[in-house]
Amino acid sequence: MITAERKPLEELIEYVKPFKRILLLGCNECVTVCAAGGRKEVGLLASGLQMAMLKNGINIEIRQHTLERQCDPEYIEELVPMIDSADAVMSMACGCGVQQIAMRFKDKPVFPAVNTTFMGASERQGVWAERCQGCGNCLLGITGGICPIARCAKQLMNGPCGGSTGGNCEISDDVDCAWQLIWDRLKALGLEKMYLENIPAKDWRTGGGSGPRKIIREDLAE
Amino acid sequence: MENFEPVIVAFCCHYCAYTAADIAGSQRLPYPPNVKIVQVPCSGKVDAQHIVTAFEKGADGVYVAGCLEGDCHFKKGNERAARRINFVKKYLEEVGLESERLEMVNVSAGMGHRFAQVATEITQKIRTLGPSPIRTALAQ
């Protein structure tokens, strides 16, 4: 999922300050799962903003709505009947959702309420960790299902480096050395041979190195 | 300020604090009428949003009363509640409210005396803190 964290309230207050009527939007997808921008977080933020403004003697009207998905235009149409009654929109979706709203409602200021952080997975309840950087040319098939791009601080293709100690990365004792994990897993699988193969220098063009990327499925595209 | 009567919302677990409140009542133990009890099936059921909404509607203080540590009817509900309280305390500070206005307490079903004592102490603390700025703003 795409993970995110709420921005500090102070920053959000600065965004909404000039406006009277705010439409606060959540998204039912990734940001709901990582507890950053679902229906519950929308409610919590609406109350928080309302109180913070009220404390400064400003009464604002906050309408809450959570869309099934903010990154798909068909769901955004749902906002048409309510957009006119808002002076500005604040979105708790990831950056994709915020941009879709901005593109659809060109005359409304749109503000992000979260910092979109990474593509990650749940390690346990309440803990999410980075697992993928969307490099566009997946290496997991030759690295034992552990990504050296998302999980090695140096993104080494043929690690580990000299900073790997006792299975940990030199940047922190809390970070596993991805290449140690790769080696351990390949060994357990009896696939040590894969480790010995040199991985050539990565072509980063598929990973955004040649500008914004787009996927076009000709059988589906209209 | 002299006539300030705080409004305090107490979310009380059905299996402990709520029963303790009943016992306090049947033992005729006095506690301040400022405390408005909301019965919940477990302190772990109390969501951050319930607490924040209470403050938004003008409560001067909120407390969540769960079972004694290790005694939760649902095993870990009171531990979860305690973690959630810490999270909401930080949020209240961000909003600009004193985090002391929110507390987590542990009371067993037989502790009628403790229930009355906690209600009295918290009411006294909130009285010292004064009215919530939100309540003041709502009244204007």
Image (cartoon, helix red, strand yellow):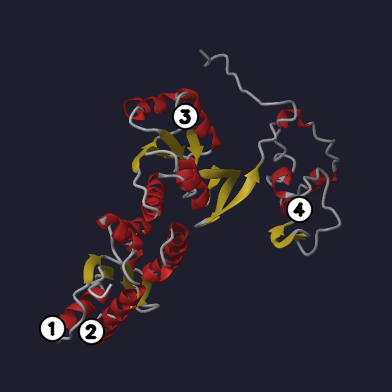
Residue B26 got which mark? 1
Q: Are marks 4 and 1 on the same chain?
A: no
Quadrant placement of the N terminus of chain A: top right
Q: What residue is disc 4 on?
A: A187
Q: Which tag is nearer the camera, tag 2 or tag 3?
A: 3
Quarter of image, res B75: bottom left
Q: Are marks 1 and 2 on the same chain?
A: yes
Secondary structure of the residue carrying tag 3 is helix
For the point 33% across and 64% down, the residue is B132
Q: What residue is disc 2 on?
A: B112
Q: What residue is disc 3 on?
A: A101
B79 lies above or below A41: below
State the CA–CA distance, disc 2 to disc 3.
Answer: 54 Å
Q: Are marks 3 and 1 on the same chain?
A: no
Query: Disc 4 is attached to a residue of which chain?
Result: A
State the CA–CA distance, disc 3 to disc 4.
Answer: 48 Å
Q: Closest to the observer: B122 or B18?
A: B122
State the CA–CA distance, disc 4 to disc 1.
Answer: 68 Å
State the CA–CA distance, disc 2 to disc 4.
Answer: 62 Å
- Asked if disc 2 and disc 4 are in contact, CB closer than 8 Å, the reply is no
Q: Position of residue B58 (x, y in %)?
A: 28, 60
In the figure, is residue B115 to the left or right of A21? left
Asked whether residue B46 is in view, the answer is yes
- Asked if disc 3 and disc 4 are in contact, CB closer than 8 Å, the reply is no
Q: Closest to the observer: A194 or B114?
A: B114
State the CA–CA distance, disc 1 to disc 2.
Answer: 9 Å
Secondary structure of the residue carrying tag 1 is helix
